[in-house]
Image (cartoon, rainbow, N blue to C red):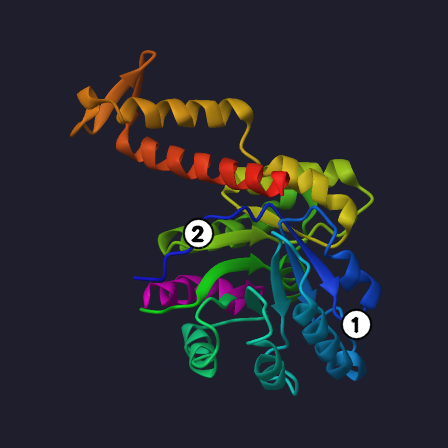
Amino acid sequence: MRRPTAIRPRRSVLYMPGSNARALEKARTLPADAVVLDLEDAVAPEAKIEARERIAAVLGEGGFGRREVVVRINALASPWGADDIARLAGSGADALLVPKVESAAEIARLEQVLAGAPAALALWAMIETPRAILEVGGIAATAAKPGARLSAFVIGTNDLVKETRATLEQGRFAALYWLSATVTAARAHGLDVLDGVYNDFKDLAGFENECQQGRILGMDGKTLIHPSQIEGANAAFSPAEAEVAWARRIIAEFAKPEAKGRGVITIDGRMVELLHAEMAARTVAIADAIAASSAG
C-alpha cells in the first residue's frame, strides 16, 4: 500500500519562475493552495544554477504558511536534474515535480535517487507526452508500492499539443482522451490529478469555463500561470455549500444505530449507498481543509 497522506486542497497550483526573486517572495502571500517554484520551462539554461540556489535559500527561509510548496526540477536526463535533486530534496519542499515522465521505470529510478531524502517528500509527475499517456496506468501503479512517494499527476497540455499537433480549441475535445485517461489512472491508484494551464490569463471567462470542465472530468484543481487565476480556480474546485451540507447529512445518517451493517439506506426518498458515504467523507474533509486554510 502507498503511504497514507492527509487530504489537502489543491484547487489552485501556481507556477512561479525560480529565477525571479520578486515572484518567489510574492509566493508567500498569494491565496493559492500550492506554489510550484519552477526550474524547468520558466528558467533559461544559463540561469538554472543561480535559480536553484535562489530556490534553496527561499525554502530555507520558510514563511509559506499553509501553502504546499513544490519544486519543478529539470529532467534527470538533462544536465541539471541530478544536481537539482541533490540540492533540493532536503530543502524543505513538500514535493518535487518531475517533467516529462514517460514510464514506471523512471519513477523507480527517482525513488532510488531519493532513498535518503526526508520521508515526507513527495513526487509529482508531469504527464505531458504521447508516450506518457500510453503508459499512464503503469506510471500510476508505482504508487501502490511500499513507501512510494508518487502522490499526484500534473497534465502538461501545452507539451501534449506540441507533440500531437492537436489544438485546444472548441472545448478541448481533442484533449479529452488525454485528460480522462490520466484521471482514470490516477484514481485507480489513489493519486491526485491537476489540470493543465490556461494560457490567456486575461480571459477569465474562458478560464472559468475550463476550470468547470476540469472539475466535471474529475480533476482536483488546476495549474496556473498568473495570480489573477487563483480566485477562479479556488471557486471552481471548492465543493458547493449545498454539496457539503448533503455530504454531512449522509455521514450523519450512516452513523445512526439503525444504519449499522447496512449497505444502503434511504434519505429523503433517495437511495444512498456506502460508496456515497465514502464520497461524502472526502467532500467534508476537503471542505474542512479549505475552511482551516482560510482561517489561517
9 and 61: which is toward the camera:
61
Disc 2 crowd rating (10 Å Cα; few below 14, some 14-19, many 20+) is: few
Q: Position of residue 112 (x, y in %)?
A: 42, 82
Kind of residue sitting beneath label 2: Ala
Q: Earlier in the sequence, mark 1 or mark 2?
A: 2
The quarter in which the C terminus is drawn is top right
Q: Quadrant of residue 78?
A: bottom right
Q: Position of residue 114 (x, y in %)?
A: 47, 79
Residues drawn in magenta: 124-145
Q: Residue at x 65, y 84 (%)?
A: 80
Q: Which residue is mark 2?
A: 6
Q: Relative to 158, is 182 on the left or the right? A: left
Q: Residue at x 71, y 45 (%)?
A: 230
**Residue lying at the far top of the rendered structure:** 269
Disc 1 crowd rating (10 Å Cα; few below 14, some 14-19, many 20+) is: many
Report helix, strand or loop for mark 2.
loop
Q: Relative to 156, is 264 on the left or the right? A: left
Does the magenta-highlighted stretch encompass residue 128?
yes
Q: Residue at x 74, y 83 (%)?
A: 49
Q: Quadrant of residue 58?
A: bottom right
Does the magenta-highlighted stretch encompass residue 82?
no
Kind of residue sitting beneath label 1: Ser
Q: Is residue 255 above or below residue 118?
A: above
Q: Which residue is mark 1?
A: 19
In this rendering, the label closer to the viewer, 1 or 2 = 2
Q: Is residue 273 above or below residue 6?
A: above
Q: Is residue 80 above or below residue 233?
A: below
Q: Magenta region, mostly helix, strand or loop?
A: helix
Q: Position of residue 54 (x, y in %)?
A: 75, 75
Q: Position of residue 124 (x, y in %)?
A: 52, 64
How many numbered circles are shown? 2
